[in-house]
Amino acid sequence: MRPAHGATLRTHLAARTSFFDEQVLAALAEGIEQVVILGAGYDDRALRFSAPAVRYFEVDQPATQRDKRRRLVRIGADLGRVTLVPADFRTDDTAAALAAAGHDAETPSLFICEGLLIYLDEDTSLRLLVALRSRSSATSRLAASLATHPDGESSDAVVASANRIRRNSRSEPWLTILPAAAQLELLERAGWRAADTSDHVRGMLLVTARAS
Ligand SMILES: C[S@@+](CC[C@H](N)C(=O)[O-])C[C@H]1O[C@@H](n2cnc3c(N)ncnc32)[C@H](O)[C@@H]1O
């Protein structure tokens, strides 16, 4: 997730979207009935991959959730199987918010962190990942995109240089870009063991993980 423009950005987003689409389709094919999308933004998988037995929980900042709800109502979307959960991962208890929204920790879930963790500092990421682990049954899984840089570079310098050329860096700064091993170690500390990784796109590690 280094600075990406034009064709690079398109390649990056296409790889990311296909990866997460495949994760959702594979989970549904295996009978997983809860999909929890963290930092969902305007993700439309709850509509594209709607299925009678499957519940979607989308978690994002309260203002984003209010705006998304307005837009979904305006287009007449069926909100019967999707719950918009307002939470700020920096300050709110995400595990409690999911429980209050009706998420069942005993039922297997697919947790998705797409394009999110780069916006959180390491402590917030760790707290969020621990919260997700606490809502996981033995066969739940996590799919995440992680921003990486080559070993030997300073992570602070990489983040600063990326933010210097981003348009939204004041309002939405990138905060965490790490070597791949450090990203996987962060997952481990939160109780997630990587089951599969792909780093075909420079600067982006796509990971599936299981509760360790
Ligand atoms: C780049 S967008 C990604 C949206 C979507 N996952 C996608 O891939 O299209 C990052 C999302 O993370 C959310 N986000 C960032 N920081 C957050 C925080 N502290 N608490 C909750 N959501 C946050 C933003 O509101 C935004 O919707």
Image (spheres, rainbow, N blue to C red):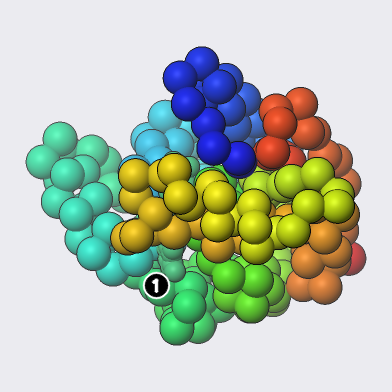
Residue to which mark 1 is pinned: 87
The residue shown at (41%, 73%) is: 88
Amino acid at the residue labelled 1: Ala
With respect to residue 197, does 69 lie above or below?
A: below
The residue shown at (44%, 59%) is: 173
Label 1 packing within 10 angstroms: few (<14), some (14-19), many (20+): many
* x and y percentages locating residue 89 in the rendered image: 48, 73
Q: Which of 69 and 108 is in front in this view?
A: 69
Q: Is mark 1 within 8 Å of ligand 1?
A: yes
Q: Can residue 198 be seen in this view?
A: yes
Task: Determine the image quadrant of residue 122.
Answer: bottom right
Q: In this view, does 91 lie to the left or right of 72?
A: right
Q: Can residue 116 be seen in this view?
A: no
Q: Nearer the viewer, residue 39 or 49?
A: 39
* x and y percentages locating residue 115 in the rendered image: 53, 47
* x and y percentages locating residue 130 in the rendered image: 69, 75
Q: Which of 69 and 120 is in front in this view?
A: 120
Q: Residue furthest top?
A: 7
The residue shown at (28%, 59%) is: 65
